[in-house]
Amino acid sequence: MTDSKYFTTNKKGEIFELKAELNNEKKEKRKEAVKKVIAAMTVGKDVSSLFPDVVNCMQTDNLELKKLVYLYLMNYAKSHPLCTDCEDPNPLIRALAVRTMGCIRVDKITEYLCEPLRKCLKDEDPYVRKTAAVCVAKLHDINAQMVEDQGFLDSLRDLIADSNPMVVANAVAALSEISESHPNSNLLDLNPQNINKLLTALNECTEWGQIFILDCLSNYNPKDEREAQSICERVTPRLSHANSAVVLSAVKVLMKFLELLPKDSDYYITLLKKLSPPLVTLLSGEPEVQYVALRNINLIVQKRPEILKQEIKVFFVKYNDPIYVKLEKLDIMIRLASQANIAQVLAELKEYATEVDVDFVRKAVRAIGRCAIKVEQSAERCVSTLLDLIQTKVNYVVQEAIVVIRDIFRKYPNKYESIIATLCENLDSLDEPDARAAMIWIVGEYAERIDNADELLESFLEGFHDESTQVQLTLLTAIVKLFLKKPSETQELVQQVLSLATQDSDNPDLRDRGYIYWRLLSTDPVTAKEVVLSEKPLISEETDLIEPTLLDELICHIGSLASVYHKPPNAFVEGSHGIHRKHLPIQHGSSGPAAPVDQPQVIPSQGDLLGDLLNLDLGPPVNVPQVCSMQMGAVDLLGGGLDSLVSDPIIIMHPTLCGWKNIIYVLLSNSWSGPGLISVDFLLLLAVLNFCVLQVWLPAAKAKGLEISGTFSRRQGHMYMDMSFTNKALQHMTDFAIQFNKNSFGMIPTTPLAVHTPLMPNQSIDISLPLNTIGPVMKMDPLNNLQVAVKNNIDVFYFSCLIPLSIFFVEDGKMERQVFLATWKDIPNENELQYQIKECHLNADTVSGKLQNNNIYTIAKRNVEGQDMLYQSLKLTNGIWILAELRIQPGNPNYTVKNTLNEKVCPNLWPVLYNIIWMQLWMYYS
Amino acid sequence: MIHSLFLVNSSGDIFLEKHWKSVVSRSVCDYFFEAQERASEPENVPPVIPTPHHYLISVLRHRIYFVAVIQSEVPPLFVIEFLHRVVDTFQDYFGLCTEAAIKDNVVVVYELLEEMLDNGFPLATESNILKELIKPPTILRTVVNTITGSTNVGEQLPTGQLSVVPWRRTGVKYTNNEAYFDVVEEIDAIIDKSGSTITAEIQGVIDACVKLTGMPDLTLSFMNPRLLDDVSFHPCVRFKRWEAERILSFIPPDGNFRLLSYHVSSQNLVAIPVYVKHNITFREGSSQGRFELTLGPKQTMGKAVESVLVSSQLPRGVLNANLNASQGTYTFDPVTKLLTWDVGKINPQKLPSLKGSMSLQAGASKPDENPTIIIQFKIQQMAISGLKVNRLDMYGEKYKPFKGIKYMTKAGKFQVRT
């Protein structure tokens, strides 16, 4: 008894003494104390109760002391109170310990925590397991590799099958968080058993747990409609949850699985009905909840308009809604507008247009225009509403109204032109480019009905260079239209605008468009009229719809940030490499192939429209006649024929015009749509024109009477610049000389310009100037641009022209078969470009022959599955090889162009190839 | 999950920050301040703001912005709901959720936030559990704590966290066992110029205050449950039973909670209890405008319309209003142009009116905008939808509780266009 008493007191005394020394004020004493502690440790004495005091000593800049403390820590980390607490009989203390553990962000320490954590993950008490699940996510954040090595991910996966719903929910949450930063996003292995577990847990866990589980369920793909339906049945009660996040996650699951249900089943229809009330309820929440809900409803309405079509009134804007809610509501109102509710919608929109907030008012006015276009029956009412709004004279309202009225004109031509007079009254108040462009378009389009159209347009012309590009382009087109309609009075005006556009502007779009008009007008006004004033296709009803595949992907992300931004998550979430794109499930099973989803027709933005039309409408409107047998030598025919044509520069073939009329139409007449045009499209057009016409390179007006038109050609391995000089001045011209600026291909004239006799007034002379490519090289933009100076006795004149690339195709462009194969493989994919040529009714041999005439050689020909594959090569004067694969299906040749070395050549190449084939067709045609 | 939380006051100062993972520099809030500057009104700050590395999700409650910082794809509604829960908890603990109240109780606030989220995952958000962990501050407790040196952190860990009914703590004891239910309906409506209803809907809630001993199991049935086709329940309600029998069956949380909220939108069920006659005109070229407003009751089933408050944002051009109120008092703030009229109770025999003139800036043109009139009112002892509780029964406990049901109708977003 006494012995033991003595022993304990003695021990207590020692520890007590050490404790006091460790807390001593003097640094030296503390160091001594730590040394004593370590000494005690080494002889096996338990000094773990000193843990807090020793750790206290760590706060020192004395390296020796620090090291000693670390020594101690290493030894006792395992018996750290946290670790011992993990074995406490009270589950709540175990849980608290494991919770705190994950917050220690020190690598060395965390290693010691693995063992206790592993125990806690298998703890008998669910509360501890649930807390441990989150701890795994914390550790993963600190040291992902360690978590994986220790097999904690597997333990988490096991927890999904846990008997306690809270544990399941937390395991799911932890796994979802880990999978975001994990390269293998398929951490959650979803199988029917797991799904069943999740669904059971769903009913019993907390609201937050329900969100995690529902989000996880939405990633599952049920194997058939029965499974989908049974999941839906068990998820539907969640729609009545008070927590809006639970509701929206449930909506996501249901929207996704709806895809799998047969559309005619009763269940499908009931489910659709059940979706509407919870969505409406979300809108009675706080404004922030409303905002997120509205962004999601915007998607849902596009995917399944039937769900909310009866509920338009809940989207009516309240006076004190925050602006971000107002704007979203407006968007959805338009999407839901239909003949049934248009009267109410219009009355609302008109009300909104008198509100204070400028952004909101603008959007409301725009919405009226969209209603007019969407619901034909309402157009008249919309127009009169817009007119009322214009009468208010509120500046931004008027401007917005004019922009939408232009669209209404496009949609319903020849119906509402009576209001033009009212519009014209507001001309002076327009100061925004959109509104100015819209007004100019209207004036140009209806020039024949506006008496003073020329004055109006002229007034815009005064400040031409201060206008935005959009306005400049529209003004150019409008004046050309005006000229074609009233040629007699507006000649001066059109010349003025053409010279402003071509000579004084730095903008290539504007310049190119100016040149095209100029050429069209100067060569054949009849065709010009046909092209510029042709019928316009009607504009689409629905704008700014989300593209269907993106919409489907976003439906899979309802409730997430992606759904708020209407962008796929990989587009903006940082470090989300683990996120795989999600797809809506596809209905499969006995009902046969997936039923096509009846999507409203989607009209792409203007830019895409252009691209599409260029591809789609390149064919002549009538059937291409059978190719006649005299195809060979057609190019030579042209080449040789050129000389005779030179003296009489006109467009060679009229019938062809209708073939590409659509392109020109899109490019020119559609110009009101703004600056969406890119130079490349014009290049293409120019390339087409290059081949069929002698272009006017230098108009007489610019060169004191000297007019130069010309083209390029390649004959017998030599390049020529075929020009026609016409003297339109009253005096004779002599002393001609020509010089090229440095250009991309180093092209220079081989011989001086040979004009020996003076050029008399009204006389023309044809010159064929041989060229070679040994001159200085400088990269031009566009690549095939050539700047030329011509001198005569009067002055020096400058012009620039585009060289058709095909004249650079050399005769020895036929690659060896073996070399070809090897090179083809070596070309990186990113150098590959693919084009389609439509409506070309030539067979492989014909095409091959035609191309060969232009130095594009067929290396090999194969027949794969009924398609002819031509492998071709060509070489440019500067040694660049271009390899191509041409796939010919009946009526639909597919051109894949692979390009070596210099990928920048390629975009220009296509028009050339295209030219060659078309050239031939046109020749037979005419 | 949720990384950090910043509390920002209306003048744009961060007065509290809490991080659940690593510390995110408060400079991330600069993006929020930018958005705040752009917004014309405090409530117009968009709730989701992207920054280069984070997303800021904010709610505005009691003129405090609660800005949560998240880094990965997290459902925004999850964050918003959580933030609202934080606000509700503060309000529950401190009586009101203001900057001053939060600053006074900053320690409790920190303790609460620490308990509510673990590493960004919600941990304990039920007020019952939280109150066991951290006792709400009361004057008495503060005094006791200062004297005895004890804290308001619960000594015991909450038992509710382990139960299958996490919303209810065990071992509840009361001497008076009582259960009160308030059926409160708010009418949201837009009335147009001519007095016809454009939209009208009812947002109803049943709030409960249940102080019952032990583990009572309650059932609540309605006379006309068909009205409730769009409902959201407290997690305690057994959904299957509702689906099958239209009866609310639940083990209630202890204390105050929202049992159910519902939404009645079909318009023929929504009665509009007041009407407004108005004549607000400005003449072109005159610097005077006419203002006339008369209120009257309709469809109130004989109940009085009380606590009526009319407010309207007059056009910017209005300099002053010189009006005469037949009852109550009116104020006009010449800076914000906000006209408020505290009417009180509507007497159907003598309808309240507010008449007079408005003066405009001399030479200014006639204002374009038409002011919207916002009306608030209360009607006691009536649920405008006609919802009526049939009976409330208690099972599982032996004692007889005291039960009470109260009905009330209020104006929600009730707007009259002129």
Image (spheres, rainbow, N blue to C red):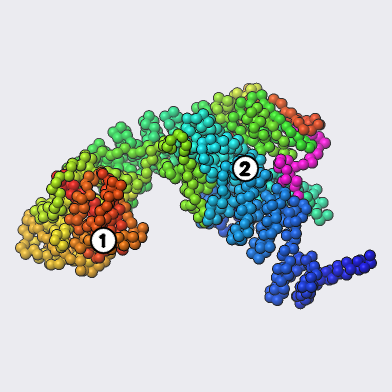
Cα distance between the residues tagged 1 and 2: 63 Å
Q: Is residue A584 left or right of A15 when viewed as pictured?
A: left
Between tags 1 and 2, which lies in front?
1
Residue at numbered disc 2: A197
Q: Which secondary structure class fits the magenta region best?
A: loop
Comparing A823 with A412, the one in front is A823
User: Regarding mark 1 in the picture, which secondary structure is present there?
Assistant: helix
Picture layout, residue A892 above or below residue B350 = below
Magenta residue span = B157-180
The picture places residue B264, in percent across and down from the top left corner, at 58, 30
Q: Is residue A858 visible?
A: yes
- Hey, what amino acid is under mark 2? Lys
Residue A663 placement: quadrant: top left
Chain ID of residue with mark 1: A
Q: Tell me the SS state at disc 2.
A: helix
Which label was assigned to residue A817? 1
Q: Position of residue A70 (x, y in %)?
A: 70, 70
Q: Quadrant of residue A65?
A: bottom right
The chain holding disc 2 is: A
> Residue extending furthest right?
A2
Say whether residue B158 is magenta.
yes
Judge if badges 1 and 2 mark residues of a common chain: yes
The amino acid marked with disc number 1 is Arg
- Residue A85 at x, y = what percent? 75, 57
Residue nearer the viewer, B156 or A456: B156
